[in-house]
Image: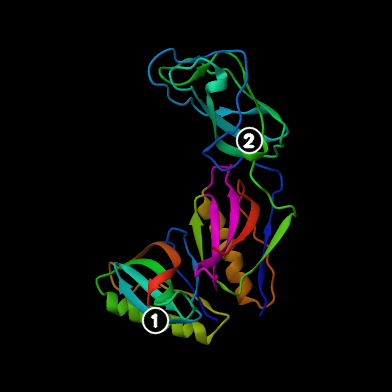
Amino acid sequence: MGYIKFPSSLTSQGQTFNCSDVYSVSISSDKFHCKYSISAAAGKVVSAIIGFTSANTAAEAARLEKAILKANQNPASCDLFETDTEGSTLSGDILILSNQDS
Amino acid sequence: MSNYIKIPIDVSRPFKPAAFALTGTATGGGTVGPASGTATASDAQIISGGSGSGAQATILQGSGNNAAIAGATITITNSGKGYKVGDVITIPIIAASGQKTSTTLLVSYTILAGDLADTASTPEEMIPVDNILALDASGNDVKLMTNIVSEEKAICFWTVKINTSGGIGVNDALIAIDEKWRKSVQAENSQPSVEFPAGISAYNVTFTTT
């Protein structure tokens, strides 16, 4: 099990995020899409959607993926994830949805 | 692992979350204004009587400048707590002010079962947190989204029903729950109890599978 804490720019001011079973991080429509290996409807996956804007989305997605891998190596950890690129922001909320395209 | 958080429950019943229109009929011998034009809701009034405290409500005149109190709508704007079915509550006389609804005598109302929030029956609810993915604030609820997918392919989630009668946002409740969730998963077999800020309490916990 692995956990990451997001910073206060999210609506809920610092949400914990369970990244166990996350197998893919991508960017779509200014949001991080973290896909879980959890059974969903055919052709759909369970995803965590996190509001995000950046001038360097690929680099930030790679950083988040790296943070997830690190978190899953140490179940007792819950490190803060902050964006690295100037002007990048995390905003909105974490949404868990079961109807995302696989 | 088997980690839990405890949600302290305030079993003293609040009204359903604002803004909630009471389901019964107001009584009282006075009349309701304005006499003409389109009426708007009164300012929020402090409710008196009954076994509870802290609730506030507005009154809106019935359509067509209906002067009868029975035609008016009472809307809860602050849920308070500690009320019981059958309690008779009163709303003070409201002076005329433009198009805002006014009253000439005390308004009375007898609380019905459908007016009050459903509360848990125990002073504490346990939530297993090992399969929680993230939290979400929604209206007056904090949802704990799980990694369990129902037969209908919907994400199952816990809902903590929050009473924010102190005027504090539900996000503060989310932060309090989030903090203990994080503490719980970082200490195996721990069962920390959520400590809500002043003015916030939880009155029910439910699990949804659809």
Mark 1 Cα-neighbour bin, 10 Å: few <14, some 14–19, many ≥20: some
Main SS of the magenta part reads: strand
Residue A75 position, x and y percent, is 56, 82
Using the image, determine if residue B82 lies above or below residue B41: below
Q: Secondary structure at mark 1?
A: strand
Q: Amino acid at mark 2?
A: Gly
Residue A50 position, x and y percent, is 39, 67
Q: Residue at x 70, y 35 (%)?
A: B52
Using the image, determine if residue B173 lies above or below residue B30: below
Q: Residue at x 50, y 50 (%)?
A: B139
Q: Is residue B156 left or right of residue B126?
A: left
> Which contiguous range is marked in magenta?
B140-168
Q: Which mark is residue B54?
A: 2
Residue B51 position, x and y percent, is 73, 33
Residue A73 position, x and y percent, is 51, 87
Q: Which mark is residue A24?
A: 1
- Tell me the quarter of the picture where residue A92 sits: bottom left
